[in-house]
Image (tube, coloured by chain):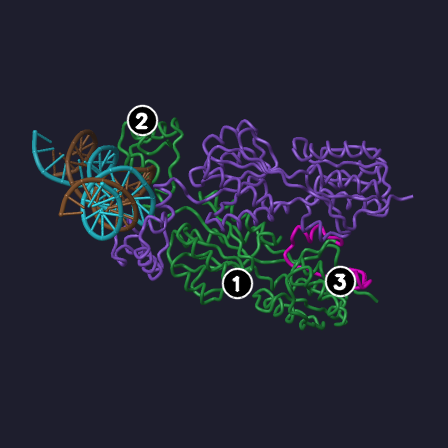
Chain colours: A green, B purple, C cyan, D brown
Amino acid sequence: MAVTIRDVAKAAGVHVSTVSRTFSSPHLVNSATRERVLAAAQRLDYRPNRAASALTTGRTHNLGLIVADIANPFFPPLIKAAQAYAREREYHVFVADTDEDPQAEEELIQTLAKQVDGVVLVAPRLSNLAIERLGMDLPFVVVNRRVKGLSAVLMDIGHGTSEAVEHLAGLGHRRIVLVPGPRASWSSEQMGRAAATAAERLGVDLVVTGPNAPTEQGGVAAAAEVLDSGATAAIAYNDLVAIGVIEGLDDRGVDVPGQVSVVGVDDTVTGRLNRPKLTTIAMPTPAAGRTAVDLLLQAVAGGRTAAQATLETSLTVRDSTGPAPG
Amino acid sequence: MAVTIRDVAKAAGVHVSTVSRTFSSPHLVNSATRERVLAAAQRLDYRPNRAASALTTGRTHNLGLIVADIANPFFPPLIKAAQAYAREREYHVFVADTDEDPQAEEELIQTLAKQVDGVVLVAPRLSNLAIERLGMDLPFVVVNRRVKGLSAVLMDIGHGTSEAVEHLAGLGHRRIVLVPGPRASWSSEQMGRAAATAAERLGVDLVVTGPNAPTEQGGVAAAAEVLDSGATAAIAYNDLVAIGVIEGLDDRGVDVPGQVSVVGVDDTVTGRLNRPKLTTIAMPTPAAGRTAVDLLLQAVAGGRTAAQATLETSLTVRDSTGPAPG
DNA sequence: CCATAGACGGCAATCGGTTGCAGTCAATAG
DNA sequence: CTATTGACTGCAACCGATTGCCGTCTATGG
């Protein structure tokens, strides 16, 4: 039914192995022969059967991309970029979603393992130990996490956080409250550290609340704490939390940015379109997606090199921050 | 290296064909034998190689899901649901993104064709003819489009649109402006028709502007036309456009919903978190994703049955609509 | 003019499962 | 007691592409 390598071989008057070589190692076949084969392939609209080649070579030309929640606005730009970049390199991407469940994550990896050449894990929920173990069988790249022996892409929230603190201090804020995410989050930690350093350097007070759910509700709930802290500016774990905080403050009749300034993290569409437009620490998610695929393909092709890439973040100032009141 | 069917056969003391049958047609093997095989498989942590089975059966157990733009907030919930539903049925999903380019779409389908059992096309940009042609080789399901001979999932925007018009008329608006999307959009057409019918029935004026880009910018640009129309309420092509319209009106000092009411379409997070919270026609995107996969698997398993599923939309009232001024 | 290296391309085994066919064995009918 | 049937299970030929090995042919050096 479908056109196979044999049909092409017959049409070009050569052996199947020659056809195979024309595609996988062209330098091994005489250019005249090659032309003939390519012409026949073209004419018959031949397309190699990847399953067959996967069987012999062990390379599927597929990658897995595992995220916590596709619908969380943080992920789509990363998925989009990773997928486009992979496609340019003749790889297809399975996208899967764990619904934030570590066990689902592990099962997913297991079933995916045989069908992909490698997997990108974005902000995995699994324990390091589990990931290391899985990493022995299959190349992995982790994003926003550090796991011994695996390549990693880290979005360094530290720099952006410092910028945010400087920005707020520059606007006259003397007391800033940090509204972190879930307790175990790597980026929450990074933010805390960077904010503390910057605050000390600039002589402003830093208060930390939380932990909070990384959602709008989490932000709404945190609004009370923000007010109690006596701070005039808040840096939230991500844009959703920031929006929640703004909403919670609004419910209490507190104006943003008039009375309290709020900074988000991620630079999602949602934040960009929010009103007031969110000042936010932009995460280079498309670059992270591309870099992750890049490192993964290196690991697939090359050897056990565990490379690290650190991507910078920076502050994007919009309308949710303003001069300190008074 | 990896555990194969032969290892399991050896461990269980049976022939490979028996192992194969224990998995693919259990009823053909004696239950005692089956137990033994399963135990051995379990012990060795055997996982079938899908590439191998794809080679003989022609079934890859993979599906393709093609959307215009992963980062457009309309798609992620659909992708998420489709993927989860497919996984329950032991299918994996390749997600790919055409960047709104019909040619990329066609190429993508071509390269994907050999590696999937079927493809879901969401709001394809290709011509019907091209899709029909491709559909001869591979099962397809189209979402929000009708193509002869193919299964389709339609989100009937008509009902939601009528509700929106009724809602606005009930609030005293006598003149409503429709802010449609791109000229060729199927749903724009549906909306136009439904809005006209409802408006006539209720005796309110309906003005149509556009066409507009389906983005925030498109909405901002359309704000002037909205004002010129003299309408006190607008129904936009989607949430992004609605947000743009609100922003454009705000720039001109027009209050929403005080002076003009605005209704969006899609019910995206972005709209939900907008301020004012968007009144919107909710699209059942997760259900559409599931239904599409469902119909696709039917087409894959069964025959050439072209089923149609129509999903209803309905109005979700929030804060961007209010009583007509005056 | 002959030996030899190098370039090319054919041969066939192989990857891991699947499946039509046939053989074995015990139970049942006659 | 024998023929027949049905339930299992083994055998081996595939699926489509890859690749190590080897033979052939030509060009080149001595």
Give the residue at mark 1.
A125
A230 lies left or right of A239: right
Q: Could you tell me which residue is drawn at 36 percent across and 47 percent down?
A: B25
- Protein chain holding label 1: A
Question: Tag count in the figure?
Answer: 3
Q: Quadrant of residue B11?
A: bottom left
State which tag comes first along the sequence, 1 or 2: 2
Mark 3 and mark 2: Cα distance apart in space: 71 Å
- Protein chain holding label 3: A
Which amino acid does the dot numbered 3 rest on?
Gly
Q: Which residues are magenta?
A: A250-276
| Vertical arrangement, residue B278 with respect to residue B184, above or below | below
Which amino acid does the dot numbered 2 rest on?
Ala
Q: Residue B52 in the image: x percent, y percent?
A: 35, 46
Assign a secondary structure to mark 1: loop
State which tag comes first along the sequence, 3 or 2: 2
Give the residue at mark 3.
A248
Q: Residue D3 in the image: x percent, y percent?
A: 18, 40
Q: Could you tell me which residue is drawn at 40 percent across and 57 percent down?
A: A138
Assign a secondary structure to mark 2: helix
Viewer-proximal residue, B208 or A147?
B208
Tell me the mark number nearer the camera, choosing from 1 and 2. Answer: 1
Mark 1 and mark 2: Cα distance apart in space: 53 Å
Q: Quadrant of the N terminus of chain B?
A: bottom left
Q: Residue A148 in the image: x percent, y percent?
A: 44, 66
Q: Are marks 1 and 2 on the same chain?
A: yes
Assign a secondary structure to mark 3: helix
Q: Could you tell me which residue is drawn at 70 percent across and 72 percent down?
A: A207
State which tag comes first along the sequence, 3 or 1: 1
